[in-house]
Amino acid sequence: MKKLAQQVAAQGADIRPVNEDEIITAEQTLGIQFSPEYKAYLSEFGLIAFGATEISGLGVPAMSHLNILSAIEPLREGKDYPPQAVPLCDIGDGYYYLYDNKQRKILTWSMINGVVDTSDEDLEAFLLRIVFDVES
């Protein structure tokens, strides 16, 4: 996540890194085993907010819309929500970017239609593109 860290620092994006205990607690609460890539995101950034773009994570109060613990609850009621996925961001009209910890893929998912697209980008490349409009 070196390139992402450089962009976060250069652009002054807001982050809220979390410790390993917070990550373990979130895994237990959600019943999800986070991938090493997602754990690295949480420990280094927690979440990312830059301009109008907000990427969910940890490091904010549990009831915040950016906290995956509260953000995931209504989504799990939607069509075919992937059991190992966590929300990354709301992209409007009932569509969300999710990160599937099992497949280690970025998914585009809808409350009504389920998964509508799967990206081959890794998490860092996706975040660079979505948050900072940087192609890796």
Image: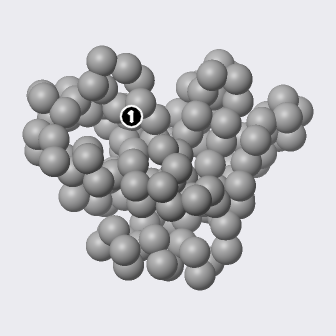
Left or right: 40, with 108 as reference point: right
Amino acid on which the number 1 mark rests in the picture: Tyr
Q: Farthest front residue?
A: 63
Q: Residue at x 42, y 60 (%)?
A: 69
Count of picture labels? 1
Residue behind mark 1: 97
Left or right: 50, with 104 as reference point: right
Q: Residue at x 54, y 72 (%)?
A: 23
Instruction: Name the foreground residue: 126 vs 15.
Output: 15
Q: Residue at x 62, y 77 (%)?
A: 20
Give the image location of residue 85, x and y in percent: 32, 53
Give the image location of residue 38, x and y in percent: 51, 58
- At mark 1, the secondary structure is strand
How busy is the neighbourhood of tag 1: few (under 14 within 10 Å), some, or many (20 plus)? many
Corner quadrant of residue 112: top left
Left or right: 82, with 9 as reference point: left
Q: Residue at x 76, y 41 (%)?
A: 14
Please determine whether, in this image, residue 46 is positioned above or below residue 107. below
Which quadrant is home to the C terminus? top right
Instruction: Name the foreground residue: 18 vs 77.
Output: 77
Left or right: 84, with 136 as reference point: left
Is residue 54 visible to us here? Answer: yes
Please determine whether, in this image, residue 55 is positioned above or below residue 45. above
Q: How is the image coloured?
A: one colour
Instruction: Name the foreground residue: 97 vs 66.
Output: 66
Please determine whether, in this image, residue 55 is positioned above or below residue 60. above
Please determine whether, in this image, residue 45 is positioned above or below residue 117. below
Give the image location of residue 34, x and y in percent: 43, 66
Give the image location of residue 64, x and y in percent: 52, 50
Q: Farthest right residue?
A: 10
Is residue 118 visible to us here? Answer: no
